[in-house]
Amino acid sequence: MKLRRRDLLKFASAAVVSTGMPRIGRAAGDANVYDLERFGNARILHMTDTHAQLLPNHFREPNINLGVGVMQGRPPHLVGRAFLDYFQIEPGSANAHAFTYLDFEKSAERYGKLGGFANLKTLIDRLRSEAGPGRSLLLDGGDLWQGSGLANTMQGADMVEVANLLGIEAMTGHWEFTYGEDVLRRNLKNFKGEFLAQNVFLTEEAAFNDAEAFDTASGRVFKPATIKELGGFRVAVIGQALPYVPIAHPKRFTPDWTFGIRDEELQKLVNSLRANDKVDAVVLLSHNGMDVDLKLASKVSGIDVILGGHTHDAVPRPVSVANPGGKTLVTNAGSAGKFLAVLDLDLAKGHVRDVRYTLLPVFANLIKPAPEMTALIERLRAPYAVAYADKIATADHLLYRRGNFNGTMDQLICDALRQELDTEIALSPGFRWGTTVLSGQSITMEDILTETAITYPEIYPLTMTGSQIKDVMEDVCDNLFNDNPYYQQGGDMVRIGGMTYTCAPKGIVGRRISDLKLENGGAIEAYKSYRVAGWASVNEQKGAPVWDVFAKYLRSGKVISRKEAGVTLKDVAENPGVARQD
């Protein structure tokens, strides 16, 4: 279906932050919705969490993104109509589709797919050209190399080629680390931009053994920051990799490195850039997650803007956070290639006079793909195209992942694990990446890999007591809903199959999960043992890769339960971060 320009309603993404008030974007009927008014003297383009999605895709935003404590009712923890009201976006509009789950399938048919690197290339080149020579910068916030079968097979090398053609000048990382140090360094040698991470250091043992580092004196593994000349002004970009890599992923991938938020080191770096390097602006390219960035912004002074990622939150307007040195603007730019952030700066010597921030949805039907990027993608995909196109099944309902609790795609994965390993219960990680399949569409092998392609995909059975199952769920729940953002590692609640439970997100640690039952209604008893299936363990496993098991299950043609995931939420009725599914 082709989208006509007059079908696009109001774009409400733009904001002039100096006044603290939003300026509503242009109305439908304009010649081109991607025309941005000229503003300032420097432009930074920001993309993040594309998860190697080279082609345009569908990605359903969550209907549950709960905020607790001081974060309740604040961005990014708004969904559905509450999101539209807060950001003044017209219901039924193109923006409403891009930023929310509302009427998703109907709107997907109307507005088409979003993203795609050939489309991004065209849009990025245009926006950089409009800024003028030497006045723009393209940054990537990480999770660029992982999330597709192709990236997993090529260990991210495909995405390095794509990044070079796109013109990415600096990036930071998260899933990039799961390829291990050797592959990471090999890819970075081929990357034409800079990899920045102020918060990654050598372990004491690695430092003693003279392990490779950017700065052996401090133990910093990677370059912490870069300074770019934009329109005659000096802009510092600091990299902040995911602080929790050795916790969220197998430690064996990064045995010589330690991570962390390291806000004290960050403050020292900012101070040095301001005092010694005489920069006019400081930007943090972050993969912390938005809640963490909001707290960080309140503690560290001297950062003008945080360009954030990791939690996949598409937030149309920056949040202004006060700190001892003034204020910092905090952003987050979505995922799956759906959005491109445009940060226009009005720079003066030593400070930023004004800022305009626009988060543009990348509607594939409105942007002509760049021929050179199309050719590169076709070349990279050619050896695998036939295998990826293999039709495994047809979706009889909407299949999606993103949301604090079980998604319909995850439910299928849990069903496949239980059948393959003959277990009562299945646990699947709460990954936020993975695109959406509309009802009636084919599920291809490429779709399956898009939901499962990681470097530790093995499935495994284990025996757990009811008490151990509850402990695991409590631990993940605390990671998601801890009042202190510094204890939140990102991701969503562990997905479950074969059981139901009640969750009280606002409860205290260790007492949020209750009423655990098997799907037959029998209570899960604390001291009784149960067979449980899982995948993506931080401990090495010997099982089959989950994508083979998932494909086998779908090929079997067995009737798939379409029951709602067995989670009952408690004390969230007034929370604007939860809404009904449609």
Image: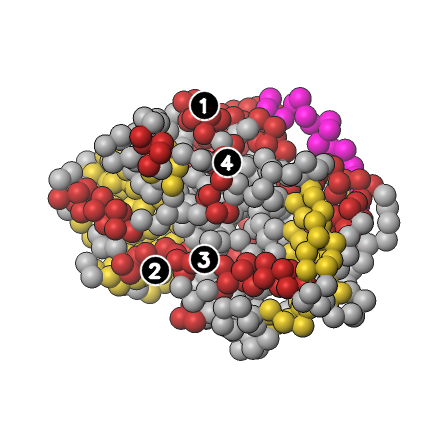
Q: Are marks 1 and 2 in contact (CB under 8 Å)?
A: no
Q: Residue at x 59, y 58 (%)?
A: 472
Identify the amino acid type marked 3. Answer: Gln
Query: Where does label 3 land, which residue?
Result: 488
Comparing 300 with 84, the one in front is 300
Q: Are marks 3 and 4 in contact (CB under 8 Å)?
A: no
Q: Nearer the viewer, mark 2 or mark 3?
A: 3
Tell me the SS state at disc 2: helix
Q: Nearer the viewer, mark 3 or mark 4?
A: 4
Residue 181 at x, y = what percent? 45, 29
Q: Based on the displayed image, in which of its 4 quarters is residue 501 positioned?
A: bottom right
Which amino acid type corresponds to the residue marked 1 in the rendered image? Arg
Q: Is residue 259 visible?
A: yes
Nearer to me, 561 or 497 = 497
Q: Identify which amino acid the numbered label 2 is placed on.
A: Lys
Q: CA distance from mark 3 to mark 4?
A: 22 Å
Question: Which is closer to the viewer, label 4 or label 2?
Answer: 4
Q: Is residue 482 above or below residue 339?
A: below
Mark closest to the chain's N terminus, 4 or 1: 1
**Label 2 or label 3, whichever comes before in sequence order:** 2
Would you call the spot at circle 1 few (<14 residues within 10 Å), some (14-19), or many (20 or more)?
few
Residue 252 is labelled as: 4
Crowd around label 2: few <14 · some 14–19 · many ≥20 (10 Å)? some
> Which of the numbered marks, if any, corresponds to residue 186?
1
Location of the C terminus by quadrant is bottom right
Mark 4 lies on a secondary structure that is: helix
If you read the primary sequence from the N terminus, does the residue marked by circle 4 or circle 2 appear first?
A: 4
- Image quadrant holding the N terminus, namely top right
Q: Which residues are magenta?
A: 379-398
Residue where numbered disc 2 is placed: 295
Image check: 166 left or right of 396?
left
Which badge, 3 or 4, comes first in the chain's sequence?
A: 4
